[in-house]
Image (cartoon, rainbow, N blue to C red):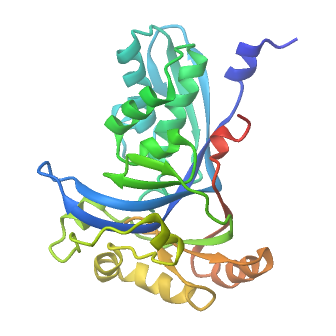
Amino acid sequence: MESQANRLWSTSWPAPAKLNLMLRITGQRPDGYHLLQTVFQFVELCDWIRFHPASDGDVRLMQPIPGVPEADDLTVRAARLLQAETGCAQGVTIEVEKNLPMGGGLGGGSSDAATTLIALNTLWNLQLPKAKLINLGLRLGADVPVFIFGHAAWGEGVGEQLQAITIPEQWLVILKPDCHVNTKEIFSAKDLTRNSKSIRMSDFIAGDRRNDCLATVSLQYPLVQEALNDLAQYAEARLTGTGACVFAEFESHDQAVEARRQLKHKWTAYLTRGVNRSPLFAED
């Protein structure tokens, strides 16, 4: 009979995408980081990661992403950070099934890093509490903590101050324009709104879903504006994070299926569903 340890090592671990359902920039810290208010919700679309034990103590990727040095890959950085923090001598080979687009604002790299921290904390029997893993995740990127938090969240600070929120779990169509939005360039843009008034969670629930990056991204990336225009023929079209992905929520599965059917000939189009509980923790 397969042991519990072997079963866990043979498991594929999900790394879900996220959407920013709202994004306000309320200020800027002296170190340049922007102060945000945002709402995160996960979607069922996932990367999948498998981990293979390595007796030599090294951390490596089974298939490095073209153009990304292995040492810079967020999963490798996450594993090595865990080793450094705990003195763990175990190694790992990381196998990533990449389904989420890069540069799309869906948080794929951050989610992969979070799943690596969660999975190796279990596989290496490190027993770090979730709060510690969230602090480690923040060192890898501002979006990593919410994936470790594991629940749809109201986010403040640079996105790491998280409070659970329950949002309708609706069907979604997500379009990925054929462009890669540079988040640093957007946050450095002179015309970016940086002084939005703070709102309350109740304001978001009542319908305040503005994204302060929308005007800047649409101006710099005409394909994003074109995708928004096409999707808006079927439902309210919105930008997630700094993009490039745009999305719309639908009342029914059939409506979402039909919208994707019409749009998939022109755009990379995903049909999925918003979920408040991350698939990474669905069986907890």
Q: In this view, does 17 lie to the left or right of 33?
A: right
Q: Is residue 149 visible?
A: yes
Q: Quadrant of the N terminus?
A: top right
Q: Looking at the image, which residue is at 44% across and 48% down?
A: 162
Query: Is 15 on the left-hand or right-hand side of 218?
Result: right
The C terminus, quarter of image: top right
Residue at 21 percent across and 62 percent down: it is 27
Q: On screen, 140 above or below 125?
A: below
Q: Residue at x 31, y 81 (%)?
A: 215
Q: Is residue 246 above or below residue 53?
A: below
Q: On the image, which quarter does residue 279 sit in?
A: top right
* Image side of residue 264 versus residue 66, left or right: right
Q: Which residue lies furthest to the left in this view?
A: 30
Does residue 84 lie above or below 18 as drawn? above
Residue 62 seen by the camera? no
> What residue sits 49% from the left and 19% below the top?
128
Q: Which of 169 and 2 is in front in this view?
A: 169
Q: Please state which of residues 187 and 65 is positioned toward the viewer in this rendering.
A: 187
In which quadrant of the rendered view does residue 230 lie? Answer: bottom right
Q: Looking at the image, how many numbered discs can be counted on the residues? A: 0
- Residue 197 occupies quadrant: bottom left
Residue 150 place in picture, x, y as percent:
57, 43
Judged left or right of residue 20, residue 222 is left
Instruction: State the image coordinates of residue 30 (x, y, percent, origin top left).
Output: 11, 51
Outermost residue on the bottom side: it is 233
- Residue 73 position, x and y percent, is 40, 37
Residue 188 vs 164, above or below: the answer is below
Query: At which x and y percent is residue 220?
Result: 28, 78
